[in-house]
Image: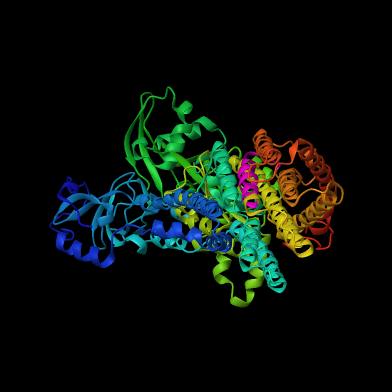
Amino acid sequence: MQTSPQEIKKVPAPENAPRQEDNPGLSTAEARRLLAQHGPNELPVSHTNPVLRFLGFFWGPIPWMIEVAAGLSILVGHLAELGIILGLLVLNAVVGFWEEYQASNTLEALKAKLAPRASVLRDGRWQALPAREVVPGDVVHLRLGAIVPADARMLDSQPVQVDQSSLTGESLPVSKERGDDLYAGAVLRRGETTALVTATGVNTFFGKTARLVSGQGAPSHFQRAVLRIGNYLIVLAVLLVSLILLVGLFRGDALLTTLQFALVLTVAAIPVAMPAVLSVTMAVGARLLTGRQAIVTKLSAIEELAGIDVLCSDKTGTLTRNELTLGDSFLVPGRSPDELLRMAALASREQDHDPIDDVILAAAGGALAGYAHEQASFKPFDPVSKRTEAAITPRQGASFRVSKGAPQVILDLTDDQELKARAGQAVEQFAARGYRALGVAVNEDGQGWRLVGVLSLLDPPREDSAATVQAVQDMGIGVKMVTGDQLPIARETARQVGLGANILDASIFDETRHHQGAGLAQAIEKAEGFAQVFPEHKHHIVKVLQERGHMVGMTGDGVNDAPGLHQADVGIAVSGATDVARAAADIVLLSPGLSVIAAAIEESRRIFQRMRSYAIYRITETIRVLLFMTLSILAFNFYPMTAVMIVLLALLNDGAILAIAYDNARGSRKPDSWHMSTVLGVATLLGLLGVFESFGLLWGVEKYLHLSAAMIQSLIYLKLSVSGHLTIFVARTRGRFWSSRPSNALLGAVILTQLAATLLTVYGVFMAPIGWKLAGLVWGYSLFWFLVEDQLKPLGYRLFDPESTGLLGRRSRPAQS
C-alpha cells in the first residue's frame, strides 16, 4: 500500500510546527518498513466469499428437506416435481442471500471513520498523505477542526481543546497539553498542534473499541424460531414417512410406489416457502420502517425489536442534544442578567471557536447590541490559569478588564468574603444538578476585581426525550440511561427525562470481586441508569441483562457505543451517529431524537404479528396435510392426493400467502416474542382439527356420493386448498376473525388463488373434473369448519399461552426493571 506520486502533496510548514532541522520526521524508507511491520492505519473488515455465502443458504434443516425431496424426485423419475422443488430451493437462497448482502455492505463504513488525509513530516518536509499510510513515529500537524488520524502524543507546549465525545462519551471538550495523548477519531476544537504518532489502526483506542464490534453478537431469535419450526416438522415427517415405509414393506407394496408416496409426504411436510415468506415479510417491513426514518441493516432486527423489554439509551447526543446551553445564573446584587451576559461575552473571542465562547456569544446577542467597544487584548483559556481575560476599550467610558473561567479561580480574584460564600453555595447547587459553573468578574477603574455573577452550562435533553421515554415505558419496556458523564450530570438528566434516581456509578464494575458478581448483576437489572461508563462497561451491561433473560435494545451514536450496539439484541444508531456506530447497529435512525424509536417499535410489532400468523398457518397446514395423508394410507390404503396435487397446493397457497407481508396487523402493547409453545400448540390444535374435517369429508363422499377414487382426490385437493387459505384468517388474529380487517392485498391473493384452484377441479386440469355442484359443496363444508375453528381457537391460546393461567403456567422471564 505505497503512495503514488500523485497522492503526495507538499504543504507549507505549519506555524508553531517543530523545525525540520530539529525533527525531520521519518524518512520514506523508515515509513515503508514501519508500514510493513504495523500494517496500514485502517480497520480491517473481514470479507466472506460471496459464492460460499450463497451456498450457505443450501445448508440447514429446511434446505435439507427440500434437497431430500429433490433426490426422491430423481429416484422415481418425477422430473416436473423436481424442477418445481429446485426452483423453490433456489428462490429461498436468492432471497436470503440478497437481503444479507445488502445489510453486510454497511460494515464497510468502519473504514470511513479515520481521517482520509493527514499532514505528515516526512523526509524533512511537510506532506499531505493518505491517513492509511501514517505509521508509529510519524510527526503529524493538526489544525482547528482536524480529525486526529491515529493515537498520538502532543509535542507543543501550547494547550489545545479536543472533542472526544464520540470516543469516551464526555459531553464537553477536554484540554490537552504537551505530553498528553490524543485519540484517533477525536476532533480539534481549539488551537493547533503537532504530535508524535504512537499507535495506528487496530492498536489505537479507536481500533480496540472497534475490535469489540468484530466479535459475535447475540444470536438471532428469528433464526432460532425458524430452526425450531423446521425441526418440529422434520421430526414429524421422519416419523410418518418411516411408518409408511414400514407398512408398505409389510404389505408387500411395490418399492417404487412406496418411494413415490414418501416423496409426496416429504413435499407435503416441507414448509418450502417459509424462509422466503418470512424474509419478504421482513423486507417489506424494512421498507415501512424506512418511511418511519429508520433504516434496517439486518432483517432479523425487526423481529428482535418487537421483543425487546429493556432499552439502554446513550445520554450524550441521544437523550440530550450534545450542545451546551446556558442554564440558571447567580447574580451579584445590583447586576442585571444582560450585564452578566455582556461581561461574559466581552471575555470571549469568536475566532477561537471555543464551545463555551460560542454559547455565550450566541446568548449575548441582545446584551451586546449597541454596545460599541474594542477588545484591546485577549488572553485565552489555558489549563494553568483556568480563565480568560480581556482588556476592553468602550467607545464611551473608561477602559476596563473582564475575566471568566473556573468559579473557584474567579472567586479567588475578589475580596468580598460574604459574596464569595454565597456564590460558592450557588456553584455547589449547580454541581449537584450536574451543571458546569462559569464565574465572571470585572476590574473597573483599577479598583480590583469584583464578581459580576456565575453562569451555569448544561447539555439539555432533546425536546422529545421525556415524551419518548414515557411512550417506550408504556409499551412495557424498561429504559436505562448509559453515559460516560459524572454521576450528578447523569442524575439530573435522568430526572429531566422522567427516569428514576437509581443511577449506578460504573466504577463499581471494576471494584466488584468475583464472588460479588450475582449482586452486581441484580443491581444492573434494577438500575435506571449508569454513569462514568467506558465502552467495555456498556458491553458488560448489555450482556448481563441478556443473561438474566432480557431482550435488550441499545441506542448510541459514538465509537464508545459500538461494542454495546453490537452485543445488544437490537443496536440502534441514532441520527448523526459515527460510521462505526452505524456499522455495529442493526437499525440506523435518520431523524434526530428518540421519538422515531417508539414508532419503529410499534411498526416492528405489527410486522412480527404478520410473521407469527404465517408460522401458525404454515405449521397448521403441514400437520393437516401430512397427518391426513398418512392416516389415509394406513387406514384405507388410499392416496387422497397425487404428487401433482401436492405441488399445486404448495405453489398456489404458499405463493399467494406472500401477500401477508402487506396485511393489516395490530401490534401488541407489550414486548412480543415467538413463545414457541403457543405457536406450536395452537397450530397443532388447528391442524388436528383440520385432519378431522378432512376425514369427515372423505367419509361423507364415500358413504353417500359413491364417487370414483380420482374424483375423491380432486374433491380432497379443493377442500385442502380452500380450508388452507381460510385458516390464515383464523391464524392472523388472537380474537375472532372479524376483529381485524385483512388487507386488500391478502384478500385479493386468496380470492385469485382459490378461484384458480376451483377452476382446476371443476374443469379437471391435472385431475378429474368434479363440476360446480360438488365444488360448491366443498366450499360450503370448508366455510362451516372455518367458523368452528375460529370459535375453538381461543381454547388453544388458553391452553398454550405462557402468559395465561393455562396448562403451561405463566411466563418465566424475569420481571422488567
Q: Position of residue 577 (x, y in %)?
A: 47, 46
Outermost residue on the right side: it is: 704
Instruction: State the scheme by which the image is colored.
Output: rainbow
Residue 493 in the magenta stretch? The answer is: no
Q: Quadrant of residue 214?
A: bottom left
Observer-nearest residue: 780 or 326?
A: 780
Q: Residue at x 49, y 47 (%)?
A: 415
Q: Position of residue 27 (x, y in %)?
A: 15, 60
Q: Position of residue 313 (x, y in %)?
A: 58, 51
- Write the start and end of the magenta stretch as one range: 646-666
Horizontally, is 545 left or right of 358 in the view? right
Q: Quadrant of the N terminus?
A: bottom left
Please say whether residue 409 is visible from this viewpoint: no
Please say whether residue 271 is visible from this viewpoint: yes
Q: Residue at x 82, y 46 (%)?
A: 785
Outermost residue on the bottom side: it is: 515
Q: Is residue 392 above or below residue 727?
A: above
Observer-nearest residue: 237 or 168?
A: 237
Q: Is residue 794 above or below residue 332?
A: below
Horizontally, is 727 left or right of 117 in the view? right
Q: Quadrant of the C terminus?
A: bottom right
Q: Is residue 375 above or below residue 505?
A: above
Observer-nearest residue: 567 or 689?
A: 689
Q: Is residue 360 above or below residue 229?
A: above
Q: Quadrant of residue 178?
A: bottom left
Horizontally, is 591 left or right of 158 in the view? right
Q: Position of residue 324 (x, y in %)?
A: 49, 41
Outermost residue on the top side: it is: 370
Observer-nearest residue: 167 or 771?
A: 771
**Mainly helix, strand or loop, the magenta region?**
helix
